[in-house]
Every structure is written in C-alpha cells, then in structure tokens.
Image: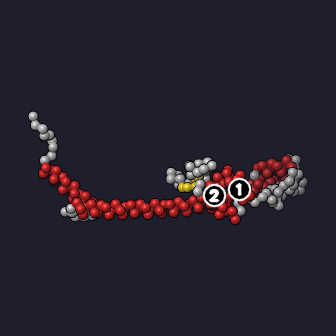
Amino acid sequence: MSDTNPNTPTVEELSAQLAALRATLAKSVGLGEEADETAILARITDTTKERDEAKARAADVEARWAGEKVDAALREAFAKSGAREEHYEDFRNLAGALFHVDPKTGRVVTKPDAPNTVPGSEPLAWIHAELKSRRGFWWPGNVSGNARGGGIGANPHGDDSCFRPGPTWNLTAQFAYEGRHGSIAADAARRRYGGGR
C-alpha cells in the first residue's frame, strides 16, 4: 500500500497554481503579471496604508458632521423651549455631552450611557422633562398682559358678540368665530349668552 494520496497535486501543478495566483494578485493591485512577491507585498502595504488613511479621514468627517448635527438640534430645541438666549452657552455645555447621533435612526438623542437621563430622548423632550426642573430660572416668569386672575376676565378669544341675542346676533359670524377659535370657544360663547337667539 502506498503512503501518497492519488489526488495530491504534483509539484508542477502546485507551481502553476501559485504562478496563476501571483499573476491574479499582481493584476488586482495594478502591477504586471510578472511582478515578484516583493513588489506585490509593497503595493499591498501601500494600498492598506491608503485605505487606513481614507478610513481615518472618513471617520473625522463623520464625527464633525455628527457634531454639527447635534449642535443644530440643540440650538433648535433651545430656541423652541422659550428659554432666555443668554443661557445658551451653559445649556450647550451641559447638554453637549449627553447627546449623539443615533447610528440606527440618524436622529439626535441622548446617549444610552448618559448619566442621570433617560436614554433615547430627543433634545426638546429632554429640555421639558428634565432640564426645566433643574434650571427653571433659565425661562422667563409667567408675567403677561393677557394673564387672567382667579376672577372673570376678558374673553381670550376676542369679540364674541355675534352670539349675543339681539341685533348683533349673526349665524355667519358665529361659524367664522368657530372656525378661528375652535368649537370649544364657540360653545363657551353660546353658554355665556344663554345658548344663542
């Protein structure tokens, strides 16, 4: 019985396969088919270095883009929250470390590992849910010329005399009033004047 496997390739076959592999590899890195191992290895090393540099540049661009997206979302949420503008820098310093661009959704949300905050919250929701309780002085007080006290005050929806029985009663004006202020305001005006005509 023989110790050799009949399916084992011969040395010549292996040499031919190696030469074909070397030629394919040389062509794939932009060299001629007759390039030796040293030239192929040098080209692969250069290509790997270029790839790593490109990945680093792409990661840098992505990080800057994510930072700009977070900044824009925080500024927009701060403006919508009604807080006084002079507190924006403090807000930015406080919130900047808590938010990131979610890689799955692309939305700006709180980080999963952010301390003392609910993960996945959007900036405006975070402001109203958490920040207002900690930094309430950033928002103006509830002072307004239209503020109503405990007593009966002026109608906040404007002139509702079209519901008053008498010469000012006007069905078209009532429908227009309801369209402008909603059905709840129109029902309140009807009750105020005893249900209409």
Horizontal and vertical percent position of residue 41: 27, 60
Determine which of the numbered discs, if any, sits on residue 135 in the image: 1
Residue type, label 1: Arg
Q: Residue at x 63, y 49 (%)?
A: 116
Which color mode does the image show?
Answer: secondary structure
Furthest-left residue in this view? 1
Residue 105 seen in the figure: yes
Question: How many numbered marks appear?
Answer: 2
The quadrant in which the N terminus is found is top left
Horizontal and vertical percent position of residue 156: 81, 56
Horizontal and vertical percent position of residue 151: 88, 51
Q: Secondary structure at mark 2?
A: helix
In the rendered view, tell whether residue 192 sits above or below residue 82: above
Determine which of the numbered discs, if any, sits on residue 94 in the image: 2
Question: Gap in Å between the C-alphas at discs 1 and 2?
Answer: 11 Å
In the picture, residue 42 is in which quadrant? bottom left
Residue 172 seen in the figure: no
Horizontal and vertical percent position of residue 3: 12, 38
N-terminal label among 1 and 2: 2
Residue type, label 2: Leu
In the rendered view, tell whether residue 18 sits above or below residue 61: above
Q: In the picture provided, is 175 more to the left or to the right than 55?
A: right
Q: Residue at x 78, y 55 (%)?
A: 177
Label 2: few (<14), some (14–19) or many (≥20) C-alpha neighbours in 10 Å: few
Quick check: marks 1 and 2 in contact, CB under 8 Å?
yes
Q: Secondary structure at mark 1?
A: loop
Q: Residue at x 86, y 53 (%)?
A: 149
Label 1: few (<14), some (14–19) or many (≥20) C-alpha neighbours in 10 Å: few
